[in-house]
Amino acid sequence: MNPATTQNSQQTKNYPGQLARIVRFFESLNEEQKRENLILYAESAKKIAPREGEIFDIQDVRKDQECADTVGVFLKIHPNKTASFRMTLGPNVQTLTKAMAAILCKGLEGVKPEEIVDLESDFVPKIVGGHLVRQRSQTTYYVLGRMKAICNNWLRRQRATQ
């Protein structure tokens, strides 16, 4: 194993479990394969929508200038203090944003809000590839920023009640 591969693997270990697996998978792909898999994730984004009867600790639905349409971020904190996310994505949300939403909902399932807030965004280029990050930098980081913000809100509420 060459030093660069070892370094990438060590860096990936710092990410929460499922996210680390997703990052490792995307790191093994060339640029074209990354794009193909991002499209597959985007197509699966319907699965991350809230389900009937689900109750959330915080809901944040809005349209920001960084995004082409309304995005809803829904946070559920479980008794063991881990997070689950659901998202609604308006019809004009870009494919890359849909893909990142699906990836992050899956990758951050069961992670503590504190870990999400502290999560470095350096994994994003490993998933989407350098070319897409340069072309669509706001889009690639938008969903992670929204997820971190909703976790921050939940943590502030927790501190205020203690």
Image (spheres, rainbow, N blue to C red):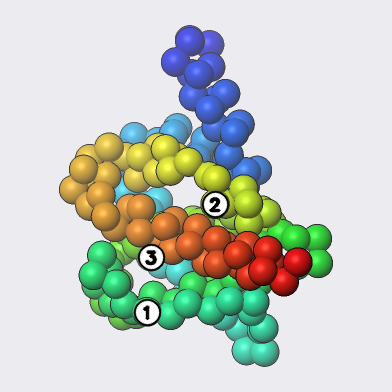
Q: Where residue 62 is drawn, which disc sits there?
A: 1
Helix, strand or loop at label 2? It is helix
141 or 9: which is nearer to us? 141
**Residue drawn where x is 45% and y is 32% of the image:** 28
CA neighbours of label 1 inside 10 A, class few (<14), some (14 to 19), many (20+): few
Give left or right: position of 83 versus 71. right
Helix, strand or loop at label 3? It is helix
Q: Position of residue 31 (x, y in %)?
A: 30, 38
Please indicate, yes or no, whether residue 84 appears anywhere in the rendered image. no
User: Identity of the amino acid at label 1?
Assistant: Arg
User: Identity of the amino acid at label 3?
Assistant: Lys
Q: Position of residue 131 (x, y in %)?
A: 22, 40
Choose mark 3 or mark 1, whichever is in front: 1
On screen, 127 above or below 84?
Answer: above
Mark with earlier residue (1, 2): 1
Mark with earlier residue (2, 3): 3
Marks 1/2 in contact by CB < 8 Å: the verdict is no
- Find residue 128 and report its image quarter: top left
Q: Which residue is mark 3?
A: 98
On screen, 104 above or below 124?
Answer: below
User: Identity of the amino acid at label 2?
Assistant: Val
Give left or right: position of 23 versus 32. right
CA neighbours of label 3 inside 10 A, class few (<14), some (14 to 19), many (20+): many
**Residue drawn where x is 59% and y is 71% of the image:** 75
Q: Which residue is mark 2?
A: 117
Q: Residue furthest top?
A: 2
